[in-house]
Structures are given as structure tokens and as C-alpha cells.
Image: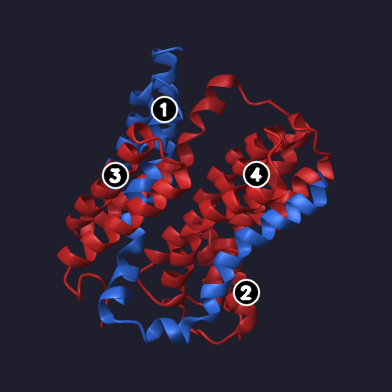
Chain colours: A blue, B red
Amino acid sequence: MNKFLLIFTCSAVTLLPRIVPYFASSALSRLPRFIRKCMMLLPVAALGALIFPLALTDFGAMWYVGLAGVGTAFLVALFRGPMILSIIIALISTTGMLMVFPA
Amino acid sequence: MGISFRELREGVHDGFPIFLGYFTTALAFGLLTRTSGFTFVEGVLTSIVTFAGSGQFLMMNLYNAGSLLLSIAVSVFFINSRYIFMASSLSQRLADPRSIPGRLMCGFGTVDEVFTVASFKGRKLSYSYMAGLIGVSYLGWTSGTAVGYAAGTFLPDVVQKAAVITVYAMFASLLGSEAGRNAKAVLVASLSALLNSILILSAGLSTGLSFLISMIAATVFGAMIYTDREAGLE
């Protein structure tokens, strides 16, 4: 297989679904109110599925390692901590868990 | 359109956590292209022209499995179909929805993390802000690929393993601050998390299809329990 053909084909099927909607916004604004409401809520709905189950299964059988990371990140943010602090604490707790429970 | 350096700086600032997450994830991708027999130029070019995490990993997996170009293209399109919804959602939040180069840039940069950070910004998005946010994320992704290819596994094993968490920690952090504003966010996100877990782990669906179903179902559920005002609809 020609690798450049592969690379540019994958680029096209990735970029088209991202770019085309930005040029269809006049059609989008004429959509029913409920659909537009759905679009506003899409980010919240996406978050759950972006985290689970992959954050747990990425650690194989040690799902609790991933859970410790996302759990601490969630709590830090819930108590108004900045995102970077969330990530640092998640990294520390995940590394710590991996050292306590070596595979 | 004018460039506001204050907005640009704010975008770079908000994008820094994405930079960290992408850089570490791209290290793994760079390494994968190397072990798959790509040259340095081919590996880095993939990240430069595509800029998609899961789509690129899927492409390499299928390529290594000897799949046909057509079936790779269809699968990658499928896993990317969620971007149609994300891009539609984000296009409603632009401060100046007319600029053509601005929209092209936003379309190019509508990846999961940029989408979530921009969506939760809570105000109209300027192109200067988006350029900062997308630029720093893109830099993390492309430079991570290059370093990963060139240097291979140089991070200590335990840190490399733990670094996987950075991207998820970012999502969890966004969810945490959203839950602080409105507790209904936890209900909506729990539904999509639960559905996605069941569909992938029990029903054995592909991650792309499962994600799409879970996201749409939870969105409709959210639209039913949120008031128009809470959803940010005027």
C-alpha cells in the first residue's frame, strides 16, 4: 500500500467531518429549538463517555489505578481547583498507585 | 479580523494542559509509527495532516493488520463521525461566524480536548483565543510524535504508564467544575459513561460506534432534564 495515499486519505476522512459543519451554520441556526439545546449539552454528555471505560481499561486489570487518577482530578475541580492542579494531582496519585500495586 | 494578543495568550494558557496530555500521548504514537515501518517523515506527516488521537491509532492498527485502504478509510471516518456533532456545537459559539480562514482553522482544530475546553469557556469564542488554544495543542501533538519516533522509550516505565492518565484527568477536571455549577451534569455524564462501558465491555461494540450512541443518548436525556436557561439557550 502507498503510505502517502493512506496518510492523506485518513487526513481527509478526519478533517471533512470537522470542517464542513462550520460552513453549514446558517442551516444549523434554523434547526428546531430542542436540537439546538442538544448541541449545547453535547459537551457534558461527551465527557462521561470520553472518560469511561477507557480511563479504567487503559490500565488493564488494574482499573482502580485509572479510577484514582480521574477521581482525584474530579474532586480537585469540584472544589474549584485549577485544571493544571487537577492533572498534577492525578499524575501523582496514578504514579503512586502504580508503585504500590506493581503489575 | 484583528488579532488580540490578550485573547491569544489566554488560549495558549488554557491549552497548556492539552499540550501536556497530547505530547505524552503522541510519544506513543511516534513510537508506533516507527515500529510499523514508517519513516520519520511519514510518521510526523501523519500527525501534521490529520491531528486526531484515536483516528491515527486506529489507522496504524488496521494498517499493521493488513487491512484494505477502503476499509481503513471507512473505519477512521466512523470513529471520527462524532466530530460532526462537536463541530456543529462549537460553530454556534463563535464570536464572528463569517470568517472563512477562521472557520477552516477551527474545523482543523476541533479535537476532543479543544472542543471541551472551548465549550466550557462560557462566552463567545474569538479566533485569536481559538488560535492560541489550537496552536499549542497542535504543537504538543506534532512535536510529541517527532520526539517519540526519534527517542523511543526514554521515559521511565512507571511514568510512561501513568502519563496515560493526563488526558482523562483533563476531562474529569472539566466535569468536576461543570458539576460545581450544575449537579445535573453528573447525571448526564454518568449516563453516557455507563452506556459506553456497557456497549464496549459487554456488547463488544467498536469504540467509535459505542461513543456515538452513548453521547447522543445522554445528550437527549440532558436536553430533557436541563431548562433552556441552564443549557445556555437564550
Q: CA distance from mark 2 to mark 3?
A: 33 Å
| Quadrant location of the N terminus of chain B in the rendered image | bottom right
Image vertical order of residue B212 relative to residue B95, above or below:
above
**Label 4 sits on residue:** B59
Type of amino acid under label 2:
Leu
Q: Chain of mark 4?
A: B
> Alpha-carbon distance for marks 1 and 4?
29 Å
Label pair 1/3, CB-CB below 8 angstroms: no
Q: Nearer the viewer, residue B209 or B142?
A: B209
The x, y position of residue B86, in whole percent, is 45, 64
Q: Amino acid at mark 1?
A: Thr
> Upstream in the sequence, badge 2 or badge 4?
4
Q: Badge 1 is on which residue?
A: A94
Mark 2, chain letter?
A: B
Which marked residue is nearer to the observer: mark 2 or mark 4?
A: 4
For residue B89, what is the image quadrant? bottom left
Q: Any mark on residue B191, and which?
A: none
Mark 2 or 3, closer to the camera: 3
Disc number placed over residue B195 in the picture, else none? 3
- Could you confirm whether marks 2 and 4 are on the same chain? yes
Q: Is residue B155 visible?
A: yes
Residue B24, compared with residue B174, is above or below; it is above
Q: Which SS class for mark 4?
A: helix
Q: How many residues crowd mark 4 within 10 Å: few (<14), some (14–19), many (20+)? A: many
**Disc nearer the start of the sequence (4/3):** 4
